[in-house]
Image (cartoon, rainbow, N blue to C red):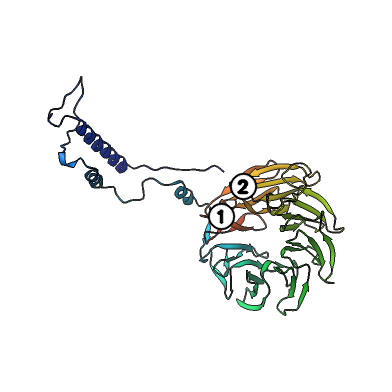
Amino acid sequence: MRHWLGLKYNSVFIDQVQKLVELFSSKRANSMANPEQESIELHGDEEIIEVIELNDNDDGPDNLADDMEDIGFEDNDEGWETEDEMESERDDSDLTFSKHTGSVFCVSMDPATNTLAVSGGEDDKAYVWRVSDGQVVLECTGHKDSVTSAVFSHDSSLVASGDMSGLIKVWKVETKEEVWSFEVGDLEWLEWHPCAPVLLAGTDDGNMWMWKIPSGDCKTFQSSACQSTSGKVLPDGKRAVVGYEDGTVRLWDLKQGNCIHVIKGQDGHQGPLTCLTCNKDGSLVLTGSVDGSVKLINTATGKVVGVFSLDGGKAKGSRNGEESNSVESVGFCNILPLIAAAYLDGTLAIYDLSTQVLRHSCRHEAGVVHLQWEESSSLVSTCSLDGALRQWDARSGKMVSEYRGHAAEILDFAMNREATVAVTASGDNQAKVFCLQRPDR
């Protein structure tokens, strides 16, 4: 990213500085001269531009400061501006949603129409609002802690909001009424079933919960007593893949309630899982961890069929999570045999799926916290702790566009199906809507 800085001058400011220079120079010259000498000696063709009467009693620094005050700097906004002030002036967004009174932690768009967004934040609230004009459709209240998960159901008729304390609420968007709520342990993730009104959640105690909404019929999937850090329902709707704090990955049968595959030990990660996702047909799963590695798992066999890291080549995961570079987000390209991984050191890595070789390393100014591929192109978008949303061409590794406007880090973002609109959530208490422009559109 190229920093930009503009410095604005105005004629009043320049004149005032010149007067200060003349005043200070005259006083300095007077103090060095013979006190009894009253005449000014000229040399050559020098010309007197202006004679300033000096008072011998005015030579002290206090009086000089008074003279500076007499210059009368005008109180206006047209002087010097810092780099931060200039950077904050740039706003590429088309709309800013400012209802939140604390950091905005999460955002998603409704899958049915892509006309609504839901955002959750530090103010213990979630808002459903229109992307076109920012009008609030539904205010989700009653939470006890920061709302860290807010997602629409597959048909956009319901929205679920979950806070850090484990209180989960489900609202009917059309009637704006709360239809169900439940309290679990500390909430780690929240996910809707891809084709049914069924909600899944992972908690701090290692359990995965599944409820039918709004009846509340419940099933739990118990594992070892460590955090269930991330989860995803596979496209067939019959299985879910869950990652855990101890580096284990489990594949669950949602109907039978049993664990189909367990990936652990040398096959598992050597640190807590941070993210996971699946390809379009659910045959492959990508997992990322604080150990700095990305693993490719075949969901039919439960075997690890690929390992990726920034070490280069066919990389192997580090055993020491404290010294490694955490993977924050992973994703499959739909049209090319490529995957992407976002790292906390500011790297977006593009890997070849078949050879497991690093193709491109795309640098950011700060950690990359989320990535998303376009549905039908080789473009991948990222949001970063430096407050920018960027688009990259995975074929060349070059940045296609950059969007700014936030005054703090971007913590999450979502895109519509056509990848023409992105909604961001930021630590500056705002969510923003950006219209994504490309030359081929």
Residue closer to the observer: 264 or 221 = 264
Q: Earlier in the sequence, mark 1 or mark 2?
A: 1
The type of residue carrying mark 2 is: Arg
**365 and 291: which one is in front?**
291
Left or right of 396, for residue 295: right
Instruction: Name the residue at the bottom extreme.
Output: 215
Q: Residues within 10 Å of mark 2 (few under 14, many from 20)?
A: few
The answer to whether 161 appears left or right of 273 in the picture is left
In what element is the residue under mark 2?
A: loop
The label nearer to you, 1 versus 2, is 1
**Residue shown at 81%/45% (left/top)?**
354
For disc 1, the marked residue is 409
Residue located 56% across and 55% down the image: 409
- Which residue: 29% across, 49% down? 74
**Which quarter of the figure is the N terminus placed in?**
top right
Task: Say which amino acid is labelled 1.
Answer: Glu
Q: Which mark is residue 438?
A: 2
* Place of residue 97 in the rendered image (x, y in percent of width and height, measured from the top left): 53, 62
The answer to whether mark 1 and mark 2 are in CB contact below 8 A is no
